[in-house]
Image: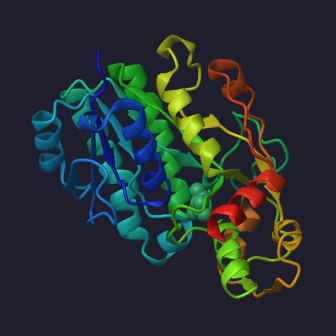
Amino acid sequence: MEKRILVLGANGQIGTVLCKALVKRYGKQNVILSDIREPKEQISQFEIIDVCDKAHIAKVIDQFQINTIYHLAAILSGNGEKNPALTWKINHDATVQLFDLCVEKKIQTIFYPSSIAIYGSKTPKINTPQYTSFNPSTVYGISKLTGEMWSAYYHSRYGLDVRSIRYPGVIGWQSIPEGGTTDYAVEIYHGAIKEKYYNCFLRANTRLPMIYMDDVIRATIQLMEAPSENLTVRTSYNLASMSFTPEELYESIKQFIPEFKIEYKPDFRQQIADSWNESIDDSNAQRDWGWKPEFDLQSMTADMIKHLS
Ligand code: SER
């Protein structure tokens, strides 16, 4: 059956890039985009949708005969701490409501992103296993972890085919993240190119798992196209690519922009980053749907600078 896709949260950091890839792959006529705000660029049919408005989503599903949903709308870790109640409403309540709607409307496949924010101080920091202890420290992390649990629940109870990846920090030149803890790794390139200076809100030695946007898009589409019977993880797949510190990222950029200067002024996000992990065991994703990253720190920096310059 032909895919008829609805994207919720199409204007965000990942949505902006993923939507273009979906339009290219499945055709403009099969991809409906939505967000709470107008898009910067109209690449396909676009609807203003508040992700909390179940009736509106139901109407759009019927109107466009949607059978596949990418649910990307969420408030990230840093911004989430400024308004926990709203973050819970959008990240958690709207998600459970959407899963219910997907059961009602017999949606075939849903993509629901999780995050490294589900890990916590009790999670092994190095080579974090797929199944281990989780104690997220942010409302964003709690909402993503419960979202994973709901994904597994809706799959086992209703047969709903929810698929999910625990994204590391995402870096890309095409879009700007809003209010996350890993945002520094995008901002730093803009600072390096425009001002030859960046004031980093994390300490120099904070090692976090990261991934380049091209790999994010490839992973997401690969998972969404994998045969359902191959998928053994119904919470969310661990996904690994690279891990580095702000200092290592700075050094990689300096090879291209030698006059680039950095200063470190950690803010409240340092505590969030300290609760996250450093590297990830993603053997389930490798085995179940053939995951393999293509970019490392060196090739990512070269590509970022080429595009942003
Ligand atoms: N990039 C996200 C954040 O920093 C993590 O999923 O909040």
Residue 129 place in picture, x, y as percent = 76, 36
Residue 100 place in picture, x, y as percent = 26, 35
Where residue 202 sits, quadrant-wise, is bottom right
Residue 42 place in picture, x, y as percent = 28, 57
Residue 88 place in picture, x, y as percent = 39, 60
Identify which residue is drawn at 33% across, 62% down.
Answer: 41
Q: Is residue 231 above or below residue 175?
A: above
Location of the C terminus (image quadrant): bottom right
Location of the N terminus (image quadrant): top left
- In this rendering, position of residue 266 left or right of residue 161: right
- Number of numbered discs on residues: 0
Where residue 77 sits, quadrant-wise, is bottom right
Q: Is residue 240 above or below residue 77?
A: above
Q: Residue furthest top?
A: 229
Identify which residue is drawn at 45% across, 41% down.
Answer: 21
- In this rendering, position of residue 245 left or right of residue 57: right
Q: Is residue 98 above or below residue 110?
A: below
- In this rendering, position of residue 283 left or right of residue 234: right
Q: Nearer the viewer, residue 112 or 20?
A: 20
- What is the basis of the colouring in this image? rainbow
Dividing the image into four quarters, tell me where ligand 1 lies.
bottom right
Q: Nearer the viewer, residue 153 or 250?
A: 250
- In this rendering, position of residue 162 left or right of residue 52: right
Residue 39 appears in the figure:
yes
Q: Nearer the viewer, residue 103 or 13?
A: 13
Residue 121 appears in the figure:
no
Where residue 307 sits, quadrant-wise, is bottom right
Identify which residue is drawn at 44% across, 34% down.
Answer: 151
Identify which residue is drawn at 74% across, 54% down.
Answer: 300
